[in-house]
Each structure stands twice: as structure tokens, then as C-alpha cells.
């Protein structure tokens, strides 16, 4: 007997876990909703703030579908907060792997807008853990509507949503931080442009930034003919 279809009406009738994974997270916006929840519970308005391109109706549908699938839960009323289940949090490795793979595409444009949660998840994805192994540093990130603290230790980079504090603090928008981290825009240049306020240990910040590089692009392929 077939199991109950608790995700969407589309169904691959395929026992492969990848097919089921697409049913769970493959609808437009679903995986990005999960991304936005990776650092803790969010209200509906906060989710829309991180996903400005999604309509209220579509976001409601995705939240309902992810809740039925057991990926997230609702807390409270009449203004509920949405939080990933323990199993939902396990999707981080999948999102990271997809992000690393997709960043190799020539079509990847790191200058496009991104949310604060997306920026934080990219740091957890792209960090060179081998080079980071001997470093210990606490870094605060203050964005217009959100803030985080990262504690680099033993090659790992746990990040929590919290008031920005640490030996290094970046006060900016996600797009500028991406330019500093991945585009290697000098901190002083971003400060001079009025796009970033920096506090703390500059040498430590520069060593931290040097731990992040976008992957090499995949070789171009041209169809024979």
C-alpha cells in the first residue's frame, strides 16, 4: 500500500530519496523558507522581510505544506512563530551542498541581493575549515533588521541570532558584507564609502575574511556541432 502523500499534489512515484526530497523542498520558495529558519524561529512578517519576492499567499501555502510534512512547526497565536523541527534543521547540509555546487555555475552572481540569514548560511557553507582550525574569534554581525554572533573555534563556525558583539563587529547590509568577504573589498574602502561601520580587531577580521573564497567555476561546455 502506498504511503499517504503529505507534501504536494505532484508525485514522482519514485522510491529514490532524491525524488521525495524534491517533493518536500522542491516547490518554489520552500527551500528558501527553510534557509530563513536555520537560525531560529521567525514570524510571518520576518520571513517576508527575508524573502521580499514571495507573496503572502504563496508564503502561507509553503508554510502550511512544510508543517504538514513535518519540516517545521507553528508556535503561538494569533501571531505565530515558525520553527524548524529537529529533522528540518538537518536540511542544512543539503542546502549547503546545493549552494556549493551551484556557486560553481558561470550564472552565479554574488552581487545580487540576499537576506541576512542567507549571508550567515553562506559563511557556514564556504568557510575553509582546515585553515580555520587554529583560529579562535568571536564575530558580531549587525544588519538593519537582524543581528548574529559567530564563534569560530576548532574549524567550526556556529552562528546564533543575538545582539552583535565580539572581538570583531561588522555593521552593514548583507550585500556589502558579501563584497567584503567574497569580493575581497577592503574594509577601509567600505568604511570610506559609508557602507560599513567596523569595530574591533582589524587583523583578526582580515584573517577571518581570508577563510572564505567562492569555488572555482565549472568548465564551460559547448554542444558539439
Image (tube, rainbow, N blue to C red):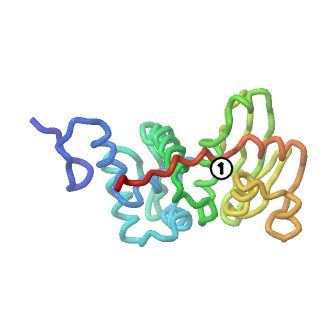
Residue at x-position 83% and y-position 46%: 205
Q: Residues within 10 Å of mark 1 (few under 14, many from 20)?
A: some
The residue furthest left is 1
The residue that appears at 41% across and 49% down in the rendered structure is 73
91 above or below 58? above
In the picture of the structure, the residue carrying the numbered disc 1 is 161
Residue 33 vs residue 20, the one in the foreground = 20
Q: Determine the residue positioned at 82% across, 45% down.
A: 166
Q: Is residue 152 above or below residue 187?
A: above
Is 55 above or below relative to 40? below
Helix, strand or loop at label 1? It is: strand
Task: Describe residue 54's horizontal placement relative to residue 49 as left or right.
Answer: left
Name the spot of residue 79 as percent of width and height, x first: 47, 64
Q: Quadrant of residue 198?
A: bottom right
Left or right of 103? Residue 166 is right
Position of 63 relative to 125 (above/below) = below
Outermost residue toward the front in this view = 225
For the point 64% across and 50% down, the residue is: 120
Asked whether 169 or 110 is in front, the reply is 110
Q: Position of residue 124 (x, y in %)?
A: 62, 42
Quarter the C terminus occupies: bottom left
In the rendered view of the protein, which quadrant contains the N terminus? top left
Left or right: where does residue 175 sit relative to residue 40?
right
The mark total stands at 1
Q: How far across and how far down the image is residue 197, in percent?
A: 84, 62
Q: Is residue 224 left or right of residue 48?
A: left
Residue 194 pos. (x, y %): 84, 70
Amino acid at each position: 500500500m502506498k504511503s499517504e502523500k503529505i507534501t504536494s499534489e505532484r508525485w514522482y512515484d519514485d522510491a529514490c530519496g532524491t525524488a521525495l526530497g524534491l517533493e518536500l523542498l522542491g516547490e518554489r520558495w520552500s527551500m528558501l523558507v527553510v534557509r530563513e529558519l536555520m537560525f531560529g524561529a521567525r514570524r510571518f512578517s520576518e520571513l517576508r522581510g527575508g524573502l521580499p519576492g514571495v507573496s503572502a499567499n504563496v508564503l502561507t501555502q509553503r508554510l502550511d505544506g512544510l508543517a504538514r510534512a513535518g519540516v517545521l512547526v507553528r508556535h503561538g497565536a494569533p501571531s505565530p512563530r515558525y520553527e524548524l523541527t529537529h529533522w528540518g534543521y538537518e536540511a542544512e547540509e543539503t542546502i549547503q551542498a546545493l549552494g556549493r555546487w551551484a556557486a560553481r555555475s558561470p550564472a552565479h552572481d554574488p552581487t545580487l541581493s540576499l537576506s541576512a540569514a542567507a549571508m550567515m548560511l553562506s559563511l557556514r557553507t564556504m568557510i575553509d575549515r582546515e585553515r580555520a582550525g587554529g583560529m579562535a574569534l568571536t564575530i558580531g554581525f549587525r544588519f538593519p533588521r537582524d543581528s548574529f554572533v559567530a564563534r569560530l573555534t576548532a574549524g567550526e563556525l556556529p552562528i546564533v541570532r543575538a545582539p552583535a558583539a565580539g572581538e570583531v563587529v561588522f555593521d552593514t547590509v548583507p550585500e556589502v558584507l558579501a563584497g567584503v568577504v567574497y569580493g575581497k573589498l577592503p574594509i577601509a574602502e567600505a568604511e570610506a564609502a559609508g557602507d560599513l561601520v567596523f569595530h574591533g580587531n582589524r587583523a583578526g577580521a582580515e584573517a577571518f575574511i581570508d577563510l572564505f573564497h567562492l569555488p572555482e567555476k565549472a568548465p564551460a561546455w559547448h554542444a558539439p556541432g
